[in-house]
Amino acid sequence: MLPDIGRLRGGAGRFRGLRLVHTHLRGEALTTDDLSDLALLRLDMVVVVQATDEGGAGAVEAAYLDPALLAGDDDAAPAEPFVHVYAPDARALDLDLVATMNALEDEFDRVIAAARGPADAERVLVIGVRIEDRHFEETLELVRSANVIIAGSLRQRRKHVHPRTIVGRGKLQEIILEGMRRSADVAIFDVDLKPAQARAFEDATGMKAIDRTQLILDIFAQRAHSRDGKLQVELAQLRYSLPRLTDQDAGLSRLTGGIGGRGPGETVMEIGRRRIRDRIRRLEKQVAQLSKQRNLRRQQRQRQGVPVLSIVGYTNAGKSTLLNALTSSDIEASSRLFMTLDPTSRRLRFPQEGEVIITDTVGFISELPPDLVEAFRATLEELEHASLLLHVADASDPHVDDKIDVVNELLTELDLGDVPTLCVLNKADAVDPEELQALVARHQAVAVSALRREGLERLISVAEARLSAR
Ligand SMILES: Nc1nc2c(ncn2[C@@H]2O[C@H](COP(=O)(O)OP(=O)(O)OP(=O)(O)O)[C@@H](O)[C@H]2O)c(=O)[nH]1
Ligand SMILES: [Mg+2]
């Protein structure tokens, strides 16, 4: 049994400074277990000395990881980038270990520099554990939206996530080698991880583990511009990270700085936790305060009797593009997921109804993390008072029906199931007309192309009819 060696010298481009030398009693060569220890623990070298019948030292076999073999071109790279050294007698082994290791670490640095290229953005390995291709592809979309470099991706379709290490041991070795080969410092998973799983993975690979919720939170953090949005995202991040805090994080001066922070008998860890809890409470108060102000504004609007139309829908359906088309605005729209975070309202004149307010909101996604639903509950409460929800769906998406279901389920979960809703099938320009007809009939929808500004008049007249039918 090998002792836990933690993160000793565990940086990119370094070996551990440890060699594993052991004997095999029955003449076996290096085993696959030996080699996977070499990779998993990033040992300098693993050496096996054969025992002779007389109990002396016989033949020696050693293996080390060669970064140059790792760097081989994508698919041509050998599955096992190990160099084997053999000597018929222990004393005959001709190897200057220190010089070899120094050369290897230099080579390692070069490989990493080459893989990194000039940009110094975070390089990530995307790891798919779920069986469904669609789920993995959506995760890749999310990662692309998060402004990081996808250095590589690996999948292990598992029915059940390995309770301790997420993936099996063989896959873990593959991930480590791929991480070195692609010079990735972060692994992003398409599932959520338990704190202990993330830690075990990080200890084993030296890579930072990010799960799906953290990924979405990270995108949200990048997109939040309003005070309200920032508060809500920070709150969700803190709530999510509290149980994931490790001793190491808690030791950061950022969390424990200041004088008199430590009460009697408290561990550093507890202080970290307590600070975070304090901050969570403060944020909760601020969010509640802002929610009150929004309520006031809403009451004013209601007194003025201006109907509110709220645009909801799956992320990337074209909600912002539709609002822009209807009101000649220029809210940022893009193929990135979760482009819009902060709700934006615009005024619009309807032919009969006169002035209405139309609001763009944050997009939905399947399995939206509960912490995020909670954090955005206040923003989404606005929708409760909408006169009409425009549920925008991307008609050109092969999974449009499923995504409509996801949005409807989330609306119900948010107690918005009873608000009158009109389904708007967007991106009509990108769908076969017959298919579109079937979709329109199935969802009693209005088809539009927000991008080409087609179908907007009909949308307005149907929406207006729904409004006056209230
Ligand atoms: N072909 C086509 N593309 C469209 C149409 N409407 C929007 N798009 C594209 O779809 C992508 C997403 O548009 P957005 O308006 O940002 O979508 P959103 O629903 O606001 O997305 P999030 O804010 O990220 O949730 C952009 O690349 C748009 O150019 C359309 O009618 N036809
Ligand atoms: Mg948007």
Image (cartoon, rainbow, N blue to C red):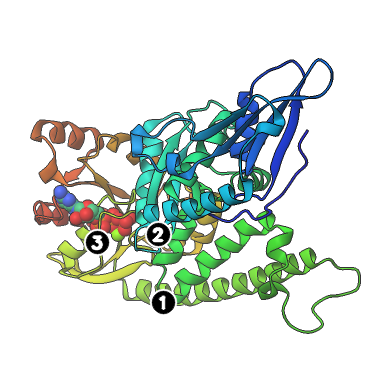
443 lies left or right of 379: left
- Near mark 3 (Cα within 10 A), the count class, few <14, some 14-19 or many ≥20, is some
Foreground tag (3 vs 2): 3
Q: Residue at x 58, y 51 (%)?
A: 99
Q: Position of residue 402 (x, y in %)?
A: 34, 35
Q: Residue furthest right?
A: 264
Compared with 293, 323 (above or below) is above
Name the residue that disc number 2 marks: 383
Mark sitting on residue 333: 3
Q: Position of residue 240 (x, y in %)?
A: 60, 56
Question: Does the beta carbon of the residue at mark 3 sit less than 8 Å from ligand 1?
Answer: yes
Q: Report if the CB atoms under discs 2 and 1 are less than 8 Å apart.
A: no
Q: Amino acid at mark 2?
A: Leu
Residue 470 in view in this figure: no
Compared with 318, 171 (above or below) is above
**Front position in the image: 63 or 266:** 63
Element at badge 3? loop
